[in-house]
Image (cartoon, grey):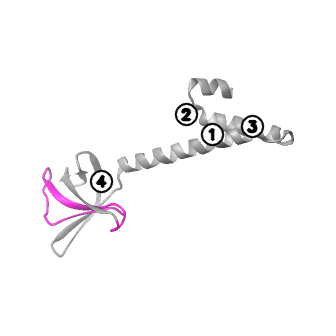
């Protein structure tokens, strides 16, 4: 669970320096944060995260925060691009099957075309159609 650790107890609206650990402690990095309210923290001018809890220990205040929506969207975009590329390769491979498998290949190609239609250009749609 992501956490944000600081040496001060910030007030709402106050900017402060902190260390953000998004992936356990392996990828901790210094950030500039702002306590927006009792329930929200803004990290580096735009990454708004929900405060899930707070713990004070040995002079450090650690907030447990929700994951980054910005980072999640980037990862989803990368995974979608990979899936689309692999589906297009599969479409090409289906066209090269021997005649005995052509019926099943056509059905699978239609399903792939339906899934990929939102990502296709107009020319690709005409070719697939």
Image coordinates for residue 21, horizontal then vertical, percent: 30, 63
Q: Viewed as shown, does residue 104 lie left or right of 54?
A: right
State the CA–CA distance, disc 4 to disc 2: 33 Å
Residue under label 1? 88
Q: Secondary structure at mark 1?
A: helix
Of the pair 20 and 98, the residue shown nearer to us: 98
Q: Which residue is mark 4?
A: 50
Task: Identify the residue at image location x=50%, y=48%.
Answer: 79
- Of the image marks 2 and 3, the number of the one nearer the N terminus: 3
Q: Residue at x 63, y 39 (%)?
A: 88
- Is 11 included in the stretch rendered in magenta? yes
Closer to the camera: disc 4 or disc 2? 2
Q: Nearer the viewer, mark 4 or mark 3?
A: 3
Alpha-carbon distance for marks 1 and 2?
11 Å
Residue 57 in the image, given as x and y percentages of width and height? 20, 74
| Label 1 crowd bin: few (<14), some (14–19), many (20+), radius 10 Å | some
- The mark nearer the N terminus, 4 or 3, is 4
Q: Earlier in the sequence, mark 1 or mark 2?
A: 1
Identify the element where label 2 is drawn: helix
Q: Above or below — where is 112 with respect to 55?
A: above
Q: Between disc 4 and disc 1, whose residue precedes?
A: 4
Magenta extent: 1-26
Q: Is residue 46 left or right of residue 75?
A: left
Identify whether 60 is placed above or below 4: below
């Amino acid at each position: 669970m992501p956490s944000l650790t600081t040496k001060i107890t910030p007030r709402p609206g106050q900017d402060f320096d902190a260390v953000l650990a998004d992936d356990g402690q392996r990828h901790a990095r210094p950030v500039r944060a702002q306590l927006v309210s009792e329930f929200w923290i803004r990290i580096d001018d735009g990454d708004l995260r929900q405060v899930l809890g707070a713990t004070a220990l040995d002079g450090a205040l650690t907030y447990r925060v929700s994951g980054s929506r910005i980072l999640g969207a980037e990862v989803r975009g990368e995974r979608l691009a990979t899936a689309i590329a692999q589906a297009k390769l599969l479409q090409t491979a289906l066209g090269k099957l021997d005649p005995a498998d052509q019926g099943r290949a056509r059905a699978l190609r239609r399903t792939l075309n339906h899934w990929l239609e939102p990502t296709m250009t107009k020319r690709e749609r005409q070719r697939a159609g």
